[in-house]
Structure formats: structure tokens, C-alpha cells
Image (cartoon, grey):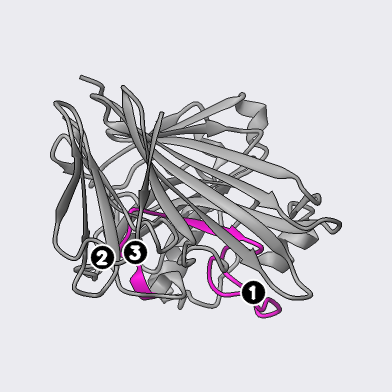
Amino acid sequence: MYKVPLHRGTYSAETTLLSSSEFTVTAWTYSSGVEAVRIRNSRGFVEVLPFMGQIIWEANFDGTSLTMKNMFTEPKPADVIVDTYGCFAFHSGLLSAGCPAPDDSHPLHGEFPCAPFDEAWLEITENSVAISGSYTYVQGFGHHYEAVPVVRLGAGEAQFDIDLAVTNKSKYQPMPLQYMCHMNYAYVDNARFGGNVPDDAFKLRESVPAHVQPTPEWTTFNKQILGKPYVELSEPEKYDPEIVWFAEDLAQYGETIEVTMGDFVTSFDSAEFPVATRWVLHNPDQQVAAFVLPGTCRPEGFKAAQRAGTLVQLAAGQTREFHVRTGLRSEK
């Protein structure tokens, strides 16, 4: 494997970093000042922000955008994810995650999604190109961890890997860990959900988080679908505010979980991710069908995970690794 370092402030205009018969890697800086790297193969591309959370800004294969409809024309410099919420995927966590409840003190989706990375690099093999990097979180009298994500695209493939390794760098104390691989897939009219998780495993969220402002129509719709499998995106006018489902104890359905929506697919290990969330929103500004968001717990904030017993404790020096594979179901 070849490792090629990436440096801040190097590529203002679009620059080709490497090119072969199968792969092209380009780098540039948006007018907003956010740097980007695009890895392209013969099927499509993934675009990653190497120094801002290693957010996956865009994914597109076989002429199909995988990314939600959003209001952003480019990524914006941000400390919290809602200030640049136009991406395909981000890492929610890591000391806390999800939507904070009134008794939580953390930002939406935690401290990590827009983290300023210490370094970034490419990893090149004969059959794949990946982008990776390292971010170290450290606070005096607080926690200390290193996070290393990887986005890897293989030759001729329309699916790609999203990996994350988190290491507790403390020499003596454990740290809490919450993580969700938050993939904001495009909304597709009349798409059906499938895979090896039963339809009725996804249970409608009954709580109402602070950022959701219910309407009478929304409340009625939630009552109508409560306790019933919901398998098709056929009522877009009903999905604003958002509709959310949870599936838990995923190990009962197998070691490898695979969930589909139309032509899209995501797979992951149920031991790494025992919980899955499904999030749907449809309005003129934003349209998203996050058909499966693998997580260590429900995305309802730190205190909720603590009370539910789903807050992971990472021992001093311990590393936890996570792997997700996602993209188009069809392979040419």
C-alpha cells in the first residue's frame, strides 16, 4: 500500500493528485474555504472533506446521486453539523451523539462531525483508493481519544466502505462512546424498504425531540402508522416534520445486517452496531430517506443512552472499530 499525505492550503484550484485507467483523485478548495478530495472510479465518485470531520459530502454512482436534497450549494465552515447539513454522510459522536434532550449539554450529534483534523492522507493499492486521517480530542481534566476514519472505493465498484477506529488515549480512565454512521440518502418516490431485518423490527419513535414541531396532520399520521410495518415511501406529504423508526437488538437477525431501499443497500456487523435508525423527511427544501443509520444506541442523546444501558465504555488504551459498506445494489 502507498500512503500519500494531504496538506492544508495546498490545492486552491482543482488539481489532479493521481490518475490511472480506473481511478482519478482530485483536490480543491471551495469558495467557502472548505477543502475537498474526490475519488473517482469507472462507476462514479465519493467526495470527502479531509480536514472537516472527514465528512462525505457527495456520493454518485452510475449517474445516480446518493445524497439527500438540501439547501447547501457547497460545504460551509462549521463547528456543528447543522451549519453544513448538505452532506451524504457524517460521523455522529463520539463522547455523545444524537439529539440532545433537555437534560443534555452536548451539541446535536456530538463534538466529532465537523472536527478539525490533525492530518489526512490517501491510501493506494492496486485495486482501491481510500482517504483517511487522524483527529485527536484532548481536554485538560477531561477525555482524550484518537479517531481514524477511512472511506475506501474499489475498482469498478458502486459500493464503498466507511470505517472508523476510536482509541481511548487515557492511561487510566474509561471514556463514554456513542457512535452512529449517519448516511443521508436521497429520497426516492415509492421506494420500498427491504433486507434481512423484518419489516416490523423498525418501531416508530413515540417521543418528540425538541427540534420537531408537530402539526395536527403529523400527529394524526403517526397515530395511524404506530405499531404497523411501514415499507414504502408513498406518502411524501406526510413526512414533514420527520418520521423516525428504531430497530434494536439486531444480533437476533444475524451477524451481518443488510438493509435496502430501492437500488440502495447498506450492510454492517450487528456486534458493532446493535441498533439501527430510519429517518425520513420530505419538504420543498430538504428530502432525505436515511433508510438505515447503524449505531451503538438510539440517537436520543447522552443521558438517554446512559439510562438505557447502551452507553459504551471504552477502557483506557482500548480501540473500537466500526465498518459499514454502502452504495448501489446493482453491480455491473
Give the amino acid at mark 3: Arg
Give the amino acid at mark 1: Ala
Name the spot of residue 148 as percent of width and height, x first: 53, 48
Real-space Cα distance between discs 1 and 3?
36 Å
Whether residue 173 is situated above or below residue 164 in the rendered picture: below
Determine whether the residue tagged by mark 2 lies in a helix, strand or loop: loop
Q: Which residue is identified by label 2?
A: 70
Quick one: quadrant of the N terminus? top left
Along the line of sight, the residue nearer the viewer: 41 or 7 = 7
Real-space Cα distance between discs 3 and 2?
27 Å
Q: Which residue is identified by label 1?
A: 101
Q: Which residue is identified by label 3?
A: 8
- Disc nearer the start of the sequence (3/2): 3
Whether residue 327 is situated above or below residue 52 in the rendered picture: above
Q: Nearer the viewer, mark 3 or mark 2?
A: 3
Quick one: quadrant of the C terminus? top left
Whether residue 74 is situated above or below residue 296 in the rendered picture: below
